[in-house]
Amino acid sequence: MIKDYWSVKDGAIVGSSEATGGLKFNTFLCSKKKYKDFELKFQVRLKGGKGNSGVQIRSELFDMKNFAVKGPQCEMGDIYWGSLYGENFGGMMKQAPKEVVAKVLKKDDFNDYYIKAVGKKITIKLNGEITVDDEFPKAPDEGIIAWQMHSGGAMEVTFKNIEFKDLSAK
């Protein structure tokens, strides 16, 4: 199933439900390894500015059939760009300021996205502007990283120029 939606093209991770007309459930491309403290930088584009995606951090896989994940998610899409949402984990954890997102978002182009998780502090930047920078007591101490394709209409998301830095003490 995962190969039906995810591919690598020109060094980028591409998730697409265009061939199937959309998904009836959220699905994720999941890391095998768990991570604690890290920095993650990448560029992301929602084709045509449509759809909804995100990156799960310190999360856990709970439905192997559909590759469904629960935990904190750094959001991409609609009014949620730059927010931290608890996917199957309690809902919105911190909404990004709408005025900041409106000022910096490139709706139909690649956006620079930055995530840093150290201890209970999570920082998200969208095109260089901080959208979340807080302590989250219920944030897990470690977990997988997972790239999301959201249910609903046909969409395509591209993640490129991905840089990961493990900040955990060895």
Image (cartoon, helix red, strand yellow):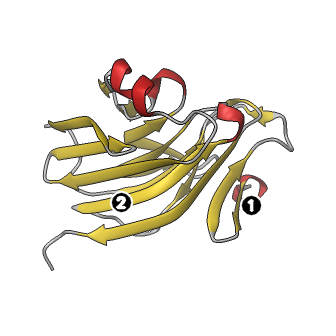
Q: Residue at x 72, y 37 (%)?
A: 155
Q: Give the Cα separation between the discs numbered 2 and 1.
A: 24 Å
First in sequence: mark 2 vs mark 1: 1
Judged left or right of residue 92, residue 4 is: right
Point out residue 125 in the picture as x, y percentages from the top left corner.
Answer: 32, 43
Question: Which amino acid type is shown beneath numbered disc 2?
Answer: Leu
Per the rendering, the mark at residue 26 is: none
Per the rendering, the mark at residue 3 is: 1
Judged left or right of residue 20, residue 164 is: left
- In the image, residue 41 above or below residue 125: below
Point out residue 75 in the picture as x, y percentages from the top left corner.
Answer: 44, 36
User: Would you name the residue on which mark 2 appears?
Assistant: 40
Of 28 and 54, the residue lying toward us: 54
Question: Which amino acid type is shown beneath numbered disc 1?
Answer: Lys
Of 52 and 62, the residue lying toward us: 52
Number of other residues with Cα within 10 Å of mark 1, as a class: few under 14, some 14 to 19, many 20 or more: few
- In the image, residue 56 above or below residue 51: below
Q: Residue at x 70, y 41 (%)?
A: 47
Q: Is residue 150 visible?
A: yes
Of 161 and 85, the residue lying toward us: 161
Of 141 and 11, the residue lying toward us: 11
Judged left or right of residue 19, residue 146 is: left
Location of residue 13 by image quarter: bottom right
